[in-house]
Every structure is written in structure tokens, then in C-alpha cells.
Image (cartoon, grey):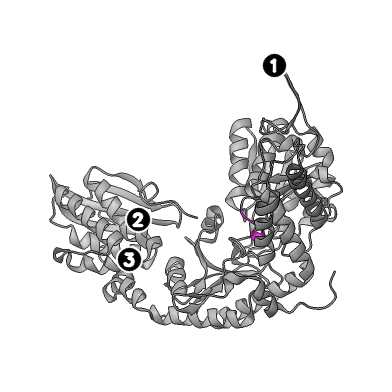
Amino acid sequence: MPSLLPDWFALRADFPILDQQVHGHPLVYFDNAATSQKPRAVVDALVRYYERDNANVHRGIHELSNRSTNAFEAARERTRKFINARSIEEIIYTRGTTEGINLIANAWGGKFIKAGDVILLTEMEHHSNIVPWQMLAERTGAKLRYIPITGDEGLLDLDKLDSLLTPEVKLFAMVHISNALGTLNPVTDLCARARKLGITTLVDGAQSAGHLPVDVQAIGCDFYAFSGHKICGPTGIGTLYGRKEVLEQTPPWHGGGEMIATVDYFKSTWNTLPHKFEAGTPDISGPIGLHAALDYLDAIGRENIFRHDLELATYAYQRLSELKGVRLFGPKGERGGLVSFLLDDVHAHDVVTIADRYGVALRGGHHCTQPLMKKLGVPSTARASFYFYNTRAEVDRFIEVVREIQKFFGV
Amino acid sequence: MSDDLNDLYQEVILEHAKSPRNFKVLPDANRVAHGTNPLCGDNYTVYLVMDGDVVKDASFQGSGCAISKASASLLTSTIKGKTRAEVEALFGKVHDMVTTGHADDAMGKLAAFAGVHKFPARVKCAILSWHAAKAAVAGGGTVSTEGDEPKAG
């Protein structure tokens, strides 16, 4: 862990994309919860791979295949270390968080979830941690149950947990940091309470991996899914962590090459972990790019990144709360690096359209959390989401633009 | 404020968004259609009173951004007295206008939406209530912006 604080401003030079004008204004990229930008080190790793080492992985005898296989598996070890899994057998490459959750819903859920079982979720889940469970419930006759949130502040109403965490619950799936509210959920405590009752747990780490130190053994979850592209890696690569004991009992999901040990015309046997869950030629450059991204993040230090993003989010929240006619969502205290808000009498899409013409990239909409929006009683929110390369001066600029938008609509 | 933004949020659009016309339920409506944009949550219902082939009265209810609300407001003002064929022809013209920026002289106040073409992400907002109106004159139902424009989000 680096002891010195990074020179945040100097890091921006590693991201050529940040240095540009959009609609005649310097780009302020505040859409990091959707996807992060990529440092040159990641782009270079991809170019190097394609220019020098590209070949299909595993089973190859020739030199290039050896190189690509080594790089592909070295990235798995790097990912293991990143989340402190016990073994590379617990690291399954996926296309992203969504695919990781679908894998569990289909392969694990298909075997272990029965009619009458309950799948416990929270009201702040992303569609990717709701819909796969609805599909599973539809197939099996299981039921869904939700932990409520406490209004606009968006904390889990944990007083209700005892009455919801009953023996019928077979799986408890929860988001670590809410992409729509910024809420940082106490996943370690939640998993501990579930474990006491023998309930399997899944943590959606799409907004937490790469934003704070993550240790899956300390969290105590059975599954943890995250995406590479939100943490400086390429799109199309993600990781599903599964506790080895659980993965061993889980049947494969996709069938095909790579995931088998032997194939007969009428019967096949499965490869060992983690390959049992990786059918077909995988995304090879993805893990290699992810490896470079994880090295990059850990050179900065995830504790540093968390504090930096929290400081920006706290500052943005405070500046917005000083304006008239602003409704803020998410917790007032510790939170992930994003702020969700609405301006009185101005729709979020109008906010985002105008901000864009000032070079400020925001997101407006339901953030793939339609049930949460209904619960909050709003059609959508506008969201500014930060990463380590964002600055306080950019937040000041964002606030200026919000004032302009309010003036434009006569608020 | 950039010229593009002033083209998009023209005075008439801002004014209609703030004080939408015909923003009510028509109790004696005999044609009703819903228009939704599932990506952004915009949601409108268009009510028509039709006498044979002619729109006698029109109104709308629902929620969405300034562009979609102003569009529904001007739509319901414009189509009163028009026949089904005229409404369908106007739908085509509005669709062309918000995608190409070309407004012919007969468009009147609707020409305010020509600036939308510089904002491809907002075309759906401008056209949503028109989809609903087209469905309503044809008998009613539910329409979605999906399938009409490229998907995103």
C-alpha cells in the first residue's frame, strides 16, 4: 500500500481522453458509474498483446499460444490477489457483472432453488440483480422478497432485516454500492447474518471493486461479481468470484469447448475449476487489459481512491444542497463517489442535455433501477459520478453549470 | 447559452413545457393511446374525441422532459379538426423534421422542434406523443419508442 498521497492532477496525464474540448468547453467527465476512462497503460497492454502475442489460449503448443495462455492466466492470478480470493479456482472470467449474476442464477439457482424458496434482495438493486432472479423465480416457483430503503436518504431499513431473513431464504443478493444512490451497504455484517442461517450470499460489486479495498474473505460472501470497464479496464471483461466449496457443487452453465474434461457422443465430464464455467474461446485481450488496470489502480491505492472520491462526492453534495430547488438522493454521510439529484421543475434529461453543451458529461434517467425510482416517486434522476482523475475544480464547474440550467428554466 | 441549445429549447417550447395546453383527461374521449419511452421513463396518454374520421377534441396527461411535454402540448393543439389521414401525414412531417431539421412552411408552431435534430438522443422525446396520437386515431393502444430509434442505455 503506497504511503504517500498520489498527485491526483498528474494522473490525468495518463488519460489522453480527458484532455479535450466538448462543444467548445473542457470536458468534465462525470459519468464514471456508467464506465470509467482507460489509462494509457491499459490501451498499451491491449496493443502490445495484439501486435506481439495474439493466439488462442490453452491447448496450443506453439510459442504465441504459450505467451497468450500465460498472460491470460497471469491476469487471473492478479485478479485473485485484487479481491483476496483463496485460489485462482475461484476466479471466473465473465463479460461483466450482469453475466456473473446470470451465471449464478442459472447454474447455481437452477440446482439449489426450489418452489417456495425465497430470494432476498434490496429495494436499491440494479436491474441486473433483479431480473435474473425474477426469471429464476418464474422457472422454479421461488419468491422474491425485498429489504426496504429509508426514503430519499436511501439506506437499508435494517430494523426489518430480522423479519425478512427467515429460514425460507436460500439466497441473499445485495449491491455493495448503489449506482443510483451512492449508498455503501454494510455487506460484511449482512453476509455474516445470512451465513448464521446457512443462506448463500451474492454481492454485486459493480460500483465497489476498484473504488475501495475489497477482500472477499473478509466480506464473507459466497459470490462477488464485478466489471472491468468501470475500473479502467476494457469493456467485455468481468469477474465472478465464487467460494470454491460452492462452485464445486454448482453445475456448468454454458457447454462447449474448454469447459469439458472428456466428451463422448452421449455423455461428457467437466473440466476443473474455474474452466468448468468458461466455455468457448474467451475474451483474451480483456483479462490482459484488466491486469494492467488492476496494477494501475493498486499503484494509486484503493484506500486513497475511496477517500478522494468520497471527498468529491461530499463536496458536490454540500454545494448542491446550498442551491435552492435541488432534491438530493442518497446518504448524507459516507457514500460511494456519486451524487444523484433533481432540480425542481426541470426534468433530468433536460439537465443532462444542457450540461453536455457545457462539456459536462452527466447521466439522467432511471439508472437501470426502475423499481427504486418508483419507490422514490420520481421518473428519473440526474447523476454525477466521480473517479480519482476528477477534481474539485471540476465540481465547481459542474455547480456553475447547474446554476445556468436553473436560470435557463427560470428556477 | 449555445446556439444549439437555443434552437432546441425555443421560447415556445419552454413556454409550453411550463404551461402545457390541453393537459387534462377528456372524460368523453372515444380514443385513448399511451406512449412510453422505457429508457427514460417518459409516459404520456393522449385522449381524443373523434367524430367519424375527424378529431373533435384532444388532450394529454403524463410526465416527461420539457421537449416531450411541449411536443404533446402543441400536438394536441394542432390536431383538433384534422382527419385521421391528415394526422398521419403530419406525423410523417414531424418525424422528418426532428430527424433532418427540415421544416416546411406549413408546420407553423411545430417548426420549433426542428432544432431537435442536432440532439439525436432527444428525437424520441419530441416524437413520443406523436406515436401515441397516430395509434389513437387508428383506434388506440400502447406504443413505445423502442423499435423506432436505435436502442441505447
Q: Is residue A398 visible?
A: yes
Which stretch did the figure color magenta? A230-235
Type of the residue with mark 2: Tyr
Locate residue A346 relative to residue A18 in the image: left or right. left
The image shows residue A226, relative to residue B15, as above or below, that is: above
* Cβ atoms under marks 1 and 2 closer than 8 Å: no
Quadrant containing the N terminus of chain B in the rendered view:
bottom left
A4 and B18: which is toward the camera: A4
Task: Return the x and y of residue A123 as percentages of the image width and height.
Answer: 62, 54
Task: Return the x and y of residue B15 as percentages of the image width and height.
Answer: 29, 74
Disc 2 residue crowd, few under 14, some 14–19, many 20+, Cα 10 Å: many
Q: Which residue is mark 1?
A: A266
* Lower sequence index among marks 3 and 2: 2
User: How far is the residue under mark 3 from the one under mark 2?
Assistant: 19 Å
The dot on residue B116 is 3
SS under mark 1: loop
Type of the residue with mark 3: Val
Callout in the foreground (1, 2)? 1
SS under mark 3: helix
Locate residue B27 relative to residue A186 in the image: left or right. left
Callout in the foreground (3, 2)? 3
Task: Return the x and y of residue B65 as percentages of the image width and height.
Answer: 39, 65
Type of the residue with mark 1: Phe
Disc 1 residue crowd, few under 14, some 14–19, many 20+, Cα 10 Å: few
Q: Which residue is mark 2?
A: B44
Q: Residue at x 25, y 69 (%)?
A: B112
